[in-house]
Amino acid sequence: MAKRGQGEGTISKRPDGTWWARLTIGKTPDGKQKRKAFYGKTRKEVQEKLTAALNDINNNTYIEPSRLTVEQWMYTWLRDYKKASVKPKTYAAYESHVKNHIVPDLGNYTLSALRNDTVQRFVNGLADKNLKYLTVERIVGTLKTALIQAVDNELISKSPASRIKMPLKQEQTPRVLTIDEQERFMKAAKEHRNGEIFILILGTGLRIGEALALTWDDIDFKEHILSVSRTQIEYCEHTNGKTIYHRGYGSPKTKTSKRTIPIIPSLMGMLQQLKEERTQEKERFKLAYQDTGLLFCNYYGVSLNYSAIEKKMQSICKKAGLEGVHPHTLRHTFATRGLENGIDLKIMQELLGHSTIKMTADLYTHVLPETKKISMMRLADTINF
């Protein structure tokens, strides 16, 4: 039996046991009522769809599915299905994919008019932009997930991205500093404020976000141990035409990223000197100083953002005469130096915080002779840690 409430629409059970709802959403040009139907397996599911439509109508944000554009749907999907269900950093990545790639190329299409060949040309265009394969894969993944949700919401009957072909994956050899390049880089880094962060990464294999999140409580000067328990997170929100930037801290990338790392004496000496400098700055700028306990911060104790660190690294590389170097290059270099000095593969996996030993072996294969590559990969495939 149909149930009707004031402003609630009509919900009925169908002969096959499923439910459907009807709602008046306006009038046609000739004055007839315009109705919208919603379907679901349970009454609760239909009620939720009906309530969402009513809220949109009351807020003057309701759009008929046939007129809903890809841009409108992508931002609705971000707001309603992702913002509260993923970490801020993950949400920021989704939002970046939508804002910088999906909307500019596909935003003006209506969902109902989006076709497989249109999506395929979009994917091919991403490859033409010389984006990394992983970046293209993530952008396409964002679009696919949003379109699957559109199917679930009965906005479209099937996803036009379900059978697209990904571009050929190109193998890329990670950049690793030679011994000479490493020495030049370290020399230049010592001449820059907070240049210690790069030297620390070279000596520990930390991710840049992990290094930016370090506090003095994470350093055990007695036992020469560094503890990784969090990472810095940066993300932005677009609200009412304004972009608001946020910086905070969250759990490391994976469960295995929470780890302890032994520190060699030369690095401990550098950290001890850095701590003394931070103490002096705290005293010098005490009226404006924010005592966050961070190792790497500005003169007033405020955390650093990734873009500032990247610019600093570019400046260091320019002075050292180096090209193609970024923070992750230092992590790769740490792993390579460890291999060259006989560090066991399992130990290196733990130091890097890799979730699987195969990830570590994949990195090592780029610096091993061909005969050793085969045995190393077999080790990664056959040993289940």
Image (cartoon, helix red, strand yellow):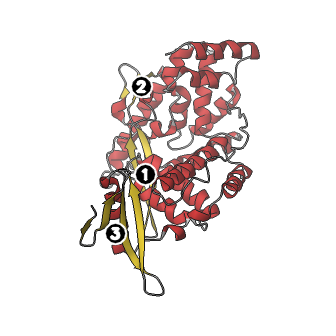
Mark 2 highlights which residue?
A: 259
> Are the two marked residues, 2 and 3, in contact with CB atoms closer than 8 angstroms?
no
Q: Amino acid at mark 2?
A: Arg
> Between disc 3 and disc 1, whose residue precedes?
3
Q: Secondary structure at mark 2?
A: strand
- Number of labels in the image equals 3
Q: Amino acid at mark 3?
A: Leu
Mark 3 highlights which residue?
A: 54
> Between disc 1 and disc 2, whose residue precedes?
1
Of the numbered discs in the image, which one, if any, rests on residue 82? 1
Question: Whole-percent x and y of residue 126?
Answer: 68, 52
The single residue placed furthest to the left in the displayed view is: 6
Q: Nearer the viewer, residue 233 or 16?
A: 16
- Residue 381 quadrant: top right
* Category of crowding for the residue at label 3, using alpha-carbon neighbours closer than 10 angstroms: few (below 14), some (14–19), many (at least 20): many
Q: Amino acid at mark 1?
A: Lys
Q: Distance between the Cα atoms at labels 1 and 2? A: 29 Å
Q: As displayed, is residue 165 above or below residue 271? A: below
> Between disc 2 and disc 3, whose residue precedes?
3
